[in-house]
Amino acid sequence: MSNVLRAFTIGLTAFLTVVDLFATQAILPALTSAYGVTPAAMGFAVNASTIGMAAGSLSVALFGRSLDRRRGILFSLLLLAVPTALLATMPNLMVFTALRVIQGVCMSTAFALTLAYLGEHTSAADTAGAFAAYITGNVASNLFGRLLAAGVVDHLGLAANFHVFALLNLSGALLVWLSVERTPPMPAVDMSRAAPLASLLAHLANPALRAAFAIGFLILFAFIGTFTYVNFVLVGPPFSIGMMMLGTVYFVFLPSVITTPLAGRVAARRGTRLTIWGAFAMALAGLPLVLSGNFGALLAGLGLIAVGTFFAQATATGFVGRAATVDRGSASGLYLASYFLGGLAGSAVLGQIFDRLGWTACVIGIGASMVLGMLLAFRLEIRPLVCPSPASAS
């Protein structure tokens, strides 16, 4: 398999793994209308997938060593199609929320096991490219998943949307079946080093890692708060755009597909702290623009926020891989758990602010979380003896 085809296959696998995570945000106004609930209630239900993402990430960090990577990824994507298809029945909001949680568990399990597979079964020279391809596919899912969801709902309705995404889940399983090679089990590890609880406590005792986990929480807090509730701003006056147009708004993610893979190189040259500050500063620069009554300015603001938050996420992920002194897999799992819990908090807290105080107050809350992330970046230091992880290029 050529390097280009291999990178495309890895990216497509990432796309099909997490495409359900944020695509549903693009149809939030339609879901809110169909269920007859407030934006905050529907926003929480849709983003409940982050609960499952956090739980799945932490579970793989704790117990994933004994799992066969290929079988785990394949089974997770096959199982993912079930709750996705059940969402098409338009169940009550509680069941809808539970199904989104189950989707999150399946997606994060496949996601974490794929990252583990890439780290274990690619050469040192190829690892950086493999991780970059996977993260690029993840970013692309934010764009094209939203476009697809908005287009399908606009032309075929809500139920058809979930059927289409269930087919995408099955396509992901088929791709894994065809492209992920069966591999021998990893060599046994020293159980004194592999004790899950001891590893987690060691990570939490590291001030730099604690700061990185908190920064991850704040990144998705801000991202979810922006790209969940801006939908309701766009469909209301003065913009009043339709569902299909709402989907095309997410072309603002396109620059992030190009910039995100560069985060590792920038952090290597400028340092993690400066890179995080620059990423948050770019996102902060977009906040005044999203309050504008001018459609073009609002889109520019969304683009800056997307580039900044994705860049910060890639940088923080790489930092965790370098800063962990033991069991980097569980450190990454803790980071992802914190990251996705931040998304849940963002949908809940900022949803209430949006419902009660409006979009301007919501944006102020988003800005406050970014400033806090910049302050936490002061603590991102690595002890001299820790060697960089190949995953840092992600």
Image (tube, helix red, strand yellow):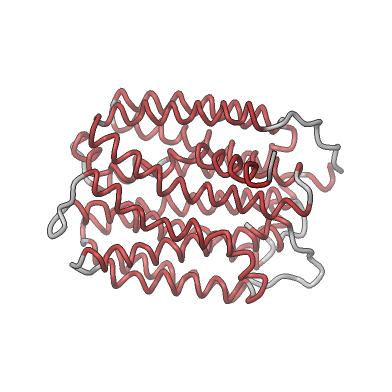
Q: Pick out the residue farthest to the left.
A: 237
Q: Percent x, y for residue 78?
A: 53, 25
Q: Quadrant of the N terminus?
A: top right
| Residue at 24% in and 68% down | 291
In the depicted view, which residue is nearer to us: 348 or 263?
A: 263
- The tally of labels here is 0
Q: Residue at x 76, y 71 (%)?
A: 383
**Residue 267 image offset from top left, x and y in percent:** 63, 70
Q: Is residue 46 above or below residue 376?
A: above
The image quadrant of residue 49 is: top left
Instruction: Please state if 60 lies on the left or on the right of 281 as rendered.
Output: right
Residue drawn where x is 53% and y is 33% of the image: 106
Say above or below: 7 vs 392.
Answer: above
Residue depicted at 52% across the width and 64% down the height: 312
Q: In which quarter of the image is the C terminus?
A: bottom right
Is 80 placed left or right of 2 in the picture? left
**Rendered position, 180 above or below 278:** above
**356 or 43, which lies in front?**
43
Percent from the top left, x then y, of residue 131? 64, 51
223 or 120: which is nearer to us? 120
Where residue 354 sits in the image (x, y, percent)? 25, 57
Relative to 7, is 186 on the left or the right?
A: right
